[in-house]
Image (cartoon, grey):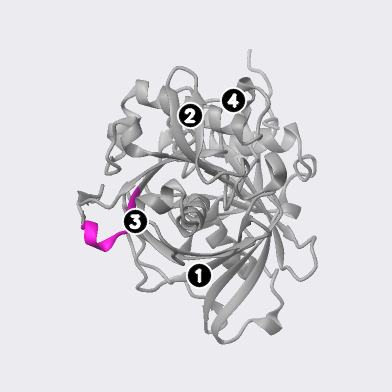
Amino acid sequence: MSTKTPPQIRIPATYMRGGTSKGVFFRLDDLPETARVPGPARDALLMRVIGSPDPYGKHTDGMGGATSSTSKCVIIAPASVPDHDVDYLYGQVSIDSAFVDWSGNCGNLSTAVGPFAIANGFVPAARIPRDGTVAVRVWQANIGRTIAVHVPVRDGQVQETGDFELDGVTFPAAEIVLEFIDPSDDEGEGGSMLPTGNLVDDLEVPGVGTLKATMITAGIPTVFVDADALGYDGTELQPAINEDKAALVKLEAIRVAGALRMGLIKAPEEAATRQHTPKVAFVAPAKDYVASSGKRIAAADIDLNVRAMSMGKLHHAMMGTASVAIATAAAVPGTLVNLAAGGGAREAVRFGHPSGTLRVGAAVALVDGQWTVTKAVMSRSARVLMDGAVRVPGDAF
């Protein structure tokens, strides 16, 4: 005897790559009514779109790619803040558990928000030149920060093709410049860019020991440690970390200890429901290595090497928000990131990551004894991969 089940529903959506990530973009008003507000219905819908939770870790029955870089959803709405074009809300969908993390931003997908806003009528036509650049002002609703996305336009339309190459992305595209305005996160102890007030802390990690750490909240809360303290040299690629279960346990312990010390959580068990933040990254002085693509990276072409964890795995390249944290920490003399880069004052840094290199700039200042960051700048690219509608069973949310 068959059981009658509801048919699938269609939801207008756009599948986009932004930087080295990709995700499913929705206009808020296109979502089913119960999913237009935060809560269980919205989370259930987005998980079903992505195909989570998936005990097989493949996302075969959804739009996700079974990695932290591809298990993402974005909701775009008219701006709720004056002098902005859109609100941008980002959901990091867990792969193997029923959970959507709303605690932070995706810097890579921030790149795609500008083109999406223009293409979907959120930017007044009068501001869009026939040929030139449009500065789309984005309110990042997860963390309450402004991002200016400088989108190239040709013949009055978003220019997607071009010759800008981004390590971690196979094909070239048009260059999009991102400006993260006042990117320090207020969350954590004291609401400071350096939540502990120190450039370097002794971080006690149960089961691991005491490690030197720089903890910063610019871009995204990040815990930086020295690679050599973990037995690494900073040139590691994904298999060296992700296939080592003991290493993953150790790095997660560091993340939990950092989250506690930064005041992001009050008890270790809370870390399970805050998988997206903080990030853990390990840094090392510049050294030659071969990137995952086979490209040779020379020590002379970079300032330092950085490897970062995302959702419990080593990231295949570098998260955009973590890149902001790297550039900011590199600009502050005395942090572990700054020391790995050779010390001294700097306004930009080029670092090596598993897929290649990235240059990011940051403007910092010492104000009333506290370090502040006013802006971070980087170049990325974005492209529409598919648009139309996603389909989910009508009883999925």
User: Label 3 is placed on what type of residue?
Assistant: Gly
Q: Earlier in the sequence, mark 4 or mark 2?
A: 2
- Seen in the picture, residue 298 relative to 118 is either above or below; the reply is above
- Seen in the picture, residue 13 relative to 95 is either above or below; the reply is below
Q: Earlier in the sequence, mark 3 or mark 4?
A: 4
User: Do the numbered discs 2 and 3 sit on residues whose CB atoms are within 8 Å?
Assistant: no
Gap in Å between the C-alphas at discs 3 and 4?
36 Å
Residue position for label 2: 254
In percent of width and height, residue 106 lies at 56, 50
Residue position for label 1: 177
Is label 3 in a helix, a strand or a loop? loop
Rate crowding at label 2 as few (under 14), some (14 to 19) or many (20 or more) other CA atoms within 10 Å. many
Q: Residue at x 74, y 34 (%)?
A: 41
Q: Quadrant of the C terminus?
A: top right
Q: Looking at the picture, tell me which residue is in the foreground, 269 or 361.
A: 361
Q: Residue at x 45, y 26 (%)?
A: 210
Query: Mark 2 against mark 3, which lies toward the viewer?
Result: 3
- State the extent of the magenta-drawn residues as a range: 298-305
Is label 1 in a helix, a strand or a loop? strand
